[in-house]
Amino acid sequence: MSGPFAGLPALLALDWGTSSLRAWLMTESGQILQEYQSKHGILNLPEGGFSAVLQTLLGLWSLPVLPPAIACGMVGSANGWAEAPYLSCPVSPDALATSLKPVQTGQGVLSIIPGIRDDGVVPDVMRGEETQILGVLALRSDLADDVTIVLPGTHSKWAQIHQGRIVGFRTFMTGELYAVLKAHSILGRFSAPERPSDAESIMAFEDGVRTGASEDSVSSLLFSARSRVLAGRLSPAAVPDYLSGLLIGNEVYAGPRLKRGASHRTVLVGDDALCARYLRAFRLLGQPEPEVLGNTAPAGLMKIAHLAGLVPGGARSQPFSGVGA
């Protein structure tokens, strides 16, 4: 759909992170009318800041006024547009919907979804992933109980779901570690600029996965990316694939050991290419194969908007609405 709209869409939904923004115009039923993506995350805003980005979206889609609008992610952090305080686990969809942070913008009201805090022995936090998790629950009612949802990314999350609530989670800095090691460590400098063949890339990744599936310290395992090259068992061009496999393999090996309860089902949510790497690691390590879903953020944003009454459709007609926090 392009050009001006005959009527206003039901919802402007935003996934506003540190380094990027994704936006969707949606109907009451959750149909996506328009999609937009930019590098204007909260740490890379144009002149005019948050409001300028919002105004750009309105102009891009010829919207005379701001429709009901909702956002998740780092936009609700202390460094964002307005801080939406964390909710402590266990957290239900209703709890998130009744804790939205309203922000008066130059265009209208934007409702920001709070993040979630796990107050376990090792405290943990998330912002944005909770909305993707709710998107899974909105799309798949059969996944409401005793399931582990894995969200690969810069800071991967392993979240436990029980009776429609997020009861706990752990973060793995897999993506960020990979980026730092590749760009700023001796391991990255040790790699070659040319790309390996597809077969060599796959073999290096799989060797890394098997190496990472260990009780040994990750800092010790990582040095094998250098020693394998010196021993002639890994080409410099394949070092990035080996590092990726090692870090993902270590995460997939450790993640199931953090489970709470008797969850035996696992779902992967996020970027298709990244989920495919994780799926390969699960298979290599003999873990039960997870189901792979795509980006569920739009469904989660719409779910919370329905529950909060921002969009007609009725909270009571939606699944999980009666589960308390």
Image (cartoon, helix red, strand yellow):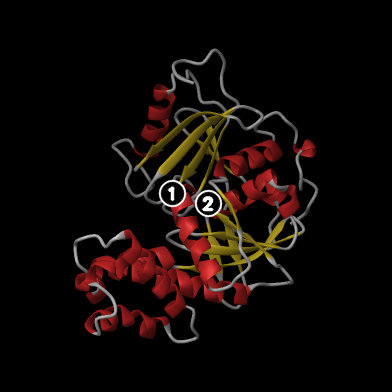
How far from the left and from the top, in percent, is residue 151? 53, 58
Q: Residue at x 70, y 40 (%)?
A: 307
Q: How many marks?
A: 2
Quick check: can you spot residue 224? Answer: yes
Decide which of 95, 2 is in the foreground and name it: 2
| SS under mark 2 | loop
| Residue density around tag 1, few if under 14, some if 14–19, many if 20 or more, within 10 Å | many
Decide which of 303, 193 is in the foreground and name it: 193
Q: Is residue 93 above or below residue 62?
A: below
Look at the numbered discs 2 and 1 and tell me whether their residues touch, using CB distance below 8 Å: yes
Q: Residue at x 43, y 85 (%)?
A: 217
Tell me where residue 254 sits by quadrant.
bottom right
Decide which of 173, 220 is in the foreground and name it: 220
| Residue density around tag 2, few if under 14, some if 14–19, many if 20 or more, within 10 Å | many
Could you tell whether 308 is left or right of 285 in the image?
right
How far from the left and from the top, in percent, is residue 73? 50, 49
Kind of residue sitting beneath label 2: Gly
Q: Residue at x 54, y 73 (%)?
A: 285
| SS under mark 1 | loop
Kind of residue sitting beneath label 1: Gly
- The residue wearing badge 2 is 128
Nearer the N terminus, badge 2 or badge 1?
A: 1
How far from the left and from the top, in percent, is residue 293? 58, 50
- The residue wearing badge 1 is 17
